[in-house]
Image (tube, helix red, strand yellow):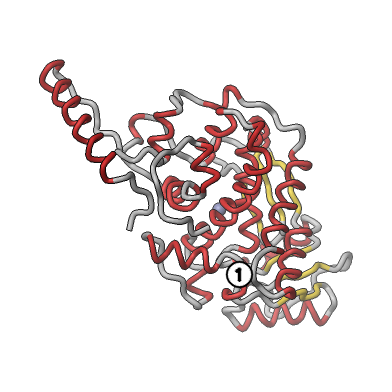
Amino acid sequence: MKLIFSSAKNTFLWIKFHRAFNFVLLFGLGFSLPLAQANDCTARSILTRFQVRGDPLTQAVRPESLASLALEVRALFLAEIQSSSISQEHKDLLSKRLMTLKIRTKACNKHSSLASNNSMTHTISVCDTMLKYPEFSLVVLLAHEMGHSMDLCGISRPFFEVKPGGKIPQFNPPLDERWADYLRQIYENESEYFIFRDMFDSPRSKEVIDRLIEEKKILRLEKGIPIEESPITENYRCLAKRSSYPELTQDHAELCKGFKYSEAGAQIWSAKVSAAYLKAKYFRMNRVDLVSMFSLMQISTKRSELQSPRDKEKDFNEIFLPQSIFRSSFECQSTVAPSCI
Ligand SMILES: [Zn+2]
């Protein structure tokens, strides 16, 4: 079911007018305009209404500091966790994950992703080019990457502290390449924490982790949190009921297969935290701040790509836009079913 709709009367009148207009153009002038969507509150219609042409980032202002912005986003994130209905024990565990997450910048080329969250080093890396983006897009981005530390896959993964010093023990038989790579990432980056990427799906994984714990190289801080104790589970269920997001499953392997659940989870977190940020800063945000979000959501304003909506655009329409703070910011008139977020 589609989440966003115009009132039936307005849609009817608009379509009538638009068809007549196209008819004139088609037969009177010899070409036609594509039929725009009747809904005034989708990513595409907002782009048109805000007259976004070219790259809004050319007007970007450099944020004062990525680190201080990250602290602000983290504080809003922590507040979201505290206001959720999960147990205090799980609130504390999730807060610990956030408080220990490191953020750094990295040099990027045009093929790099804008930011990433490496669970084995418990670090978010943000492209240095992102520092040219307006503040609000960085908020959306940071909240998304922080969300990965407790997305619908990540939440059930175990969380460890790395004890300083010491060498990696010798294993017999030697570690396979995947394990060797994990340990390199942890020890070469002097990680202090990590969220274990495997779900102990092999006896070997369990054996290696147990040995590292036994030799006091690492400490298990939590064994992972059940999906029912995630602050975003009910939001996701609501979305899956209304839209084409897949049903939630209890199966860890399925939740961590590909990116469909983890991405949706990070987007829900981003939508929650970005909405809180927007509420706090609403009165000093300008159109560039608002529009900058679109670049980040990877919606192209290139004509050739207008016909192929991508997953991020769908998320924007169905996860972000139904929230009233986004709708009023983008001057949306059409009504919408209550937000799942
Ligand atoms: Zn992501």
Report whether 101 appears left or right of 116: right
Crowd rating for badge 1 (residues with CA inside 10 Å; few <14, some 14–19, many 20+): many
Instruction: For mark 1, give the secondary structure.
Output: loop
Report whether 300 appears left or right of 10: right
Report whether 209 appears left or right of 235: right
Where is residue 242 shown, x and y percent of the image? 38, 62
Callout 1: CB less than 8 Å from ligand 1 = no
Quarter location, residue 188: bottom right
Quarter location, residue 47: top left
Tell me the residue at 61%/47% (across/down).
274
Residue found at the very far top of the displayed protein: 29
Residue found at the very far left of the displayed protein: 27
Position of residue 311 relative to residue 236, above or below, is above
Where is residue 312 shown, x and y percent of the image? 46, 47
Instruction: Work out whether residue 277 or residue 170 is closer to the camera in this orientation and state it.
Output: 277
Where is residue 20 shown, x and y percent of the image? 16, 27
Instruction: Work out whether residue 141 or residue 280 is closer to the camera in this orientation and state it.
Output: 280
Tell me the residue at 50%/78% (across/down).
250
Residue found at the very far front of the displayed protein: 9
Amino acid at pointer 1: Ser
Report whether 186 appears left or right of 133: right
Where is residue 182 shown, x and y percent of the image? 68, 64
Position of residue 102 relative to residue 164, above or below, is above
Residue at the disc numbered 1: 230
Tell me the residue at 40%/47% (across/down).
335
Position of residue 89 relative to residue 312, above or below, is below
